[in-house]
């Protein structure tokens, strides 16, 4: 019996993990620059947390949740995203209030039962941030700028920030009214889901992926055109400040996010180097979610980056990180005596926090040299019987190809 990996999931193999580690490290460093602290929550939560926050008429809730009952019959769901769990954790642990700004970040796996394709998996990874406590448009700008800085630090190029405003509870009734008016004659020609959405939540029609619905959606009213005064001023402020900070962005009034909790500013950063799934990150403001989930009225904003998509761009670009993941020292030994001595030196090297390895399969010198190459070793130290007698051996620099004789006692100092 052979087992294969579940559809829509991927192993991240040892040759890929150095790139993942590097990207995660840059995320942590960038978030720390802006004073964000890490939070880790369980990978499953009560199903209701997601249905309440993301919205029952979204694709995520209606089609994509990994929902299951535990042995006591409780309905649980593997997290499809991390904003709702972070709000839940903050409320349970009193991490947020109206008179302080709380900045949090997370990195971890998310689960959505989607049709797998390039850039879309059923288990994927996000790095994201959430800020609670401030409605200041400067925070919206900070969040977008941090996202841009993060991608620059990783080395992603040719990106575009798409920004939109979806309004608030004051302007939404007007938007809803206009959408109903616009779709009412055509909804019978649209898909079954759109007919449901027309009744329950007409704004979700704008997120329909069906081809036959697109032609109606293209000319539908846009939320930016129905903003109330407060939302309009707020959006203009954000745009002005992004301009002032020379951020390359475009207002995209067709930008629709797949989650219902957003208010006011929403955005996505898209890459020309990905296929149909071109959003590398997405986020926005969600000023009503904390209250919706049982807390006080606390404004919030955040984003999440799809790490598989970042990796995909980096891999397509053949943007290799030099010697990343390679070890510093490989000890090649010939004979049992040399092997024992080599092991001693290996222990000492690692104690000095220098990564090192040796052969445990009794391979020939030639094969050991090949292994050193494969491991990306920067130095190889070659010990045979003669060397034991002399108390020194040849140290080869695998990058410059230089070699010199180094005494056993000097090995650590000459490679550190
Ligand atoms: P989202 O747009 O659903 O937002 O996901 C954010 C990013 O995760 C996407 O831009 C994409 O790069 C990646 N992503 C989503 N689904 C998949 C998938 N099936 N396979 C691979 N990558 C995927 C959220 O999740 C919000 N919680 C973001 C947020 C935080 N808004 C406010 N705070």
Image (cartoon, rainbow, N blue to C red):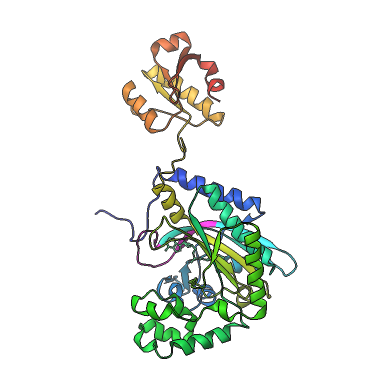
- Image quarter of residue 112: bottom left
Q: Can residue 92 be seen at all in this image of the molecule?
A: no
What is the quadrant of the C terminus in the image? top right
The residue segment tinted magenta is: 107-122
Please report the residue visible at 46 percent of the width from the left and 40 percent of the height from the top: 321
Of residues 49 and 187, the one nearer the viewer is: 187
> In this picture, is 353 found above or below 211?
above
Please report the residue visible at 61 percent of the width from the left and 82 percent of the height from the top: 169
Task: State the image coordinates of residue 45 (x, y, percent, origin top left).
Answer: 51, 68
- Image quarter of residue 291: bottom right
Q: Can residue 310 be seen at all in this image of the molecule?
A: yes
What is the quadrant of the N terminus in the image? bottom left
Number of numbered markers: 0
Task: State the image coordinates of residue 349 (x, y, percent, origin top left).
Answer: 52, 26
Task: State the image coordinates of residue 369 (x, y, percent, origin top left).
Answer: 36, 25
> In this picture, is 153 found above or below 212?
above
Please report the residue visible at 38 percent of the width from the left and 63 percent of the height from the top: 276
Q: Is residue 302 magenta?
A: no
């Amino acid at each position: 019996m052979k087992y294969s990996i579940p559809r829509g999931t991927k192993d991240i193999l040892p040759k890929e993990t150095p790139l993942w580690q590097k990207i995660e490290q840059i995320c942590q460093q960038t978030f720390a620059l802006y004073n964000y602290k890490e939070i880790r929550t369980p990978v499953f939560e009560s199903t209701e947390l997601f249905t309440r926050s993301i919205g029952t008429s979204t694709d995520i809730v209606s089609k994509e949740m990994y929902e299951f009952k535990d042995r006591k019959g409780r309905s649980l769901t593997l997290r499809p995203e991390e904003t709702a769990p972070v709000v839940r954790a903050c409320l349970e642990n009193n991490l947020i209030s109206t008179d302080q700004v709380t900045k949090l970040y997370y990195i971890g796996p998310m689960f959505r039962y989607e049709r797998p394709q390039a850039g879309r998996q059923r288990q994927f990874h996000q790095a994201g941030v959430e800020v609670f406590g401030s409605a200041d448009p400067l925070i919206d700008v900070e969040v977008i700028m941090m996202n841009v800085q993060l991608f620059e630090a990783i080395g992603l190029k040719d990106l575009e920030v798409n920004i939109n405003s979806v309004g608030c509870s004051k302007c939404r009734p007007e938007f809803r009214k206009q959408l109903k008016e616009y779709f009412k004659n055509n909804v019978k020609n649209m898909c079954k889901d759109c007919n449901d959405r027309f009744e329950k939540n007409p704004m979700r029609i704008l997120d329909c992926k069906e081809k036959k619905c697109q032609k109606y959606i293209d000319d539908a009213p846009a939320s930016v055109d129905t903003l109330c005064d407060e939302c309009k001023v707020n959006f203009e402020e954000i745009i002005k400040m992004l301009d002032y900070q020379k951020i390359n962005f475009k207002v995209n009034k067709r930008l629709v996010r797949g989650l219902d909790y957003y208010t006011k500013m929403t955005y996505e950063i898209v890459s020309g180097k990905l296929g149909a799934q071109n959003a590398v990150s997405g986020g926005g403001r969600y000023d009503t979610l904390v209250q919706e989930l049982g807390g006080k009225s606390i404004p919030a904003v955040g984003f999440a980056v799809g790490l598989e998509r970042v990796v995909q761009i980096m891999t397509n670009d053949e943007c290799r990180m030099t010697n990343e993941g390679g070890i510093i020292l490989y000890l090649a030994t010939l004979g049992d005596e040399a092997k024992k001595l080599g092991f001693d030196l290996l222990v000492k090297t690692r104690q000095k926090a220098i990564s090192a390895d040796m052969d445990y399969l009794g391979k020939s010198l030639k094969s050991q040299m090949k292994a050193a190459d494969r491991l990306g070793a920067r130095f190889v130290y070659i010990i045979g019987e003669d060397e034991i007698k002399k108390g020194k051996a040849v140290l080869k620099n695998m990058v410059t190809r230089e070699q010199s004789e180094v005494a056993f006692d000097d090995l650590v100092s000459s490679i550190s």
